[in-house]
Image (spheres, rainbow, N blue to C red):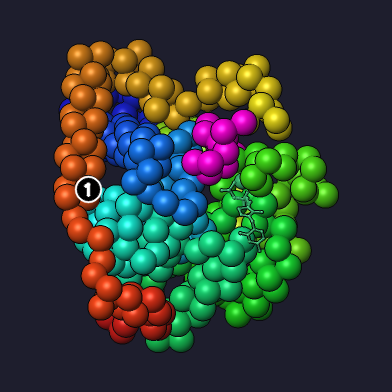
Amino acid sequence: MANKVEENSLLTTAELEQYYREMLFIRHFEEKCNVAYRQGKAGGYMHVYIGMEALAVAFINSIRKGHDYVITAYRDHAHALMLGTDPVAVMAEIMGRSAGTAGGKGGSMHIYDPKNGFYGGWGIVGGHIPLGAGLAFAAKYRGEDRVTLNFMGDGASNQGVVFETLNMSGLWDLPCLYIVENNEFAMGTRLEYHAADMELWKRGQAFGIRSERIDGMDIIELKKNAQEAIDYVRNEGKPMWLEIMTYRFAGHGAADNDRQLYRTKEEEQKNFERDPVKRLATYLIENKIATVEKLDAIDADTHEQVERIYELADASPFPNKDEVYHNIYSDMTPEVGH
Ligand SMILES: Cc1ncc(C[n+]2csc(CCOP(=O)(O)OP(=O)(O)O)c2C)c(N)n1
Ligand SMILES: [Mg+2]
């Protein structure tokens, strides 16, 4: 039977445990990616989602998976994992192997899996925002009730093309949810050095778009707000702009080894206390929804899963020379009724 806590949060014990498991799975997956990078098994650029796990978990659990569309920038592993992309294919892509989502040609920044509604994985800051609006336009034009989740960073939200896209979205009522993952940094540039107005949530308002700022570290609150926003976009057939307050726990990318050049250890420590995984663990234990032993078992289990994923990805060969022109371009036109 649902207890008081569950009634308040409108989430069941099973859902809360699922989100805990998913956030931990992403965290262990990302930690393993960092290991792979240090081993020289992942090349190029790689950016992990540690500290931000609640965002992908809350939003992607609030859509119709495989029906709705998702697009994001290069910090993209978690979005694919949450949409149901084979985790071995994600890890193999990061390691440049033929079992990867793009046969090992895209790498970490270009995970792509349209069968699961994932349209990438893009490296040019802000470049994918109009592409996401295009997905939303296609859905509207075809009379489909699909929602597009268009994720971007706080830095990306300064790009000129974002404002053009918002104008068209407001003008044409595109069913697109813009989600600004405000992790307080654009590479080594702090928010206060890159944004004239740090209240990024206001930016949608200029285009008549409903706009809000939401906490991104409390998965219970976030899940409720994410569902409400997605329902609004789907039911009203209108865009929405959200700023989600989070923090990037790791460096910008795997090659960023000197975070103290742009932030202090004290600041980091203060923000690590906002950890969405620890926060949910405390909530589950204090409210007697789960025991410490249960949470430890989930931790060990997800850790073990990731180890196996890594081994399978590592067993996949590098692409053959004759595959060099495969998986380079993709027709992004969403298939009708996929
Ligand atoms: C058009 C363009 N300019 C610059 C870069 C270099 N660059 C890569 S990531 C990044 C910072 C983006 O920060 P943000 O949008 O906040 O995303 P986050 O990395 O925090 O997720 C920059 C400037 C780029 N990839 N594309
Ligand atoms: Mg950022």
Crowdedness near tag 1: few (<14), some (14–19) or many (≥20) residues, C-alpha within 10 Å: some
Residue closest to the eye, 311 or 228: 311
Which residue is outermost to the right?
196
Is residue 247 magenta-colored?
yes
Residue occupying the point 25% across, 60% down: 318
Q: Is mark 1 within 8 Å of ligand 1?
A: no
Over which residues does the magenta segment extend?
A: 245-258
- Amino acid identity at mark 1: Asp
Q: Which residue is mark 1?
A: 314
Q: Is residue 172 left or right of residue 2?
A: right
Q: Is residue 180 left or right of residue 202?
A: left
Residue occupying the point 27% across, 54% down: 92
Can residue 5 be seen here? The reply is yes
Is residue 6 magenta-colored?
no
Residue occupying the point 51% across, 78% down: 134
In the rendered image, which quarter is residue 265 located in?
A: top right
Question: Percent from the top left, x then y, of residue 98?
Answer: 24, 63
Q: Main secondary structure of the magenta part?
A: loop
Q: Is residue 19 above or below residue 282?
A: below
Q: Is residue 316 left or right of residue 67?
A: left
Q: Secondary structure at mark 1?
A: helix
Q: Quadrant of ligand 1?
A: bottom right
Question: Percent from the top left, x then y, of residue 219?
Answer: 43, 35
- Which quadrant does the C terminus fall into? bottom left
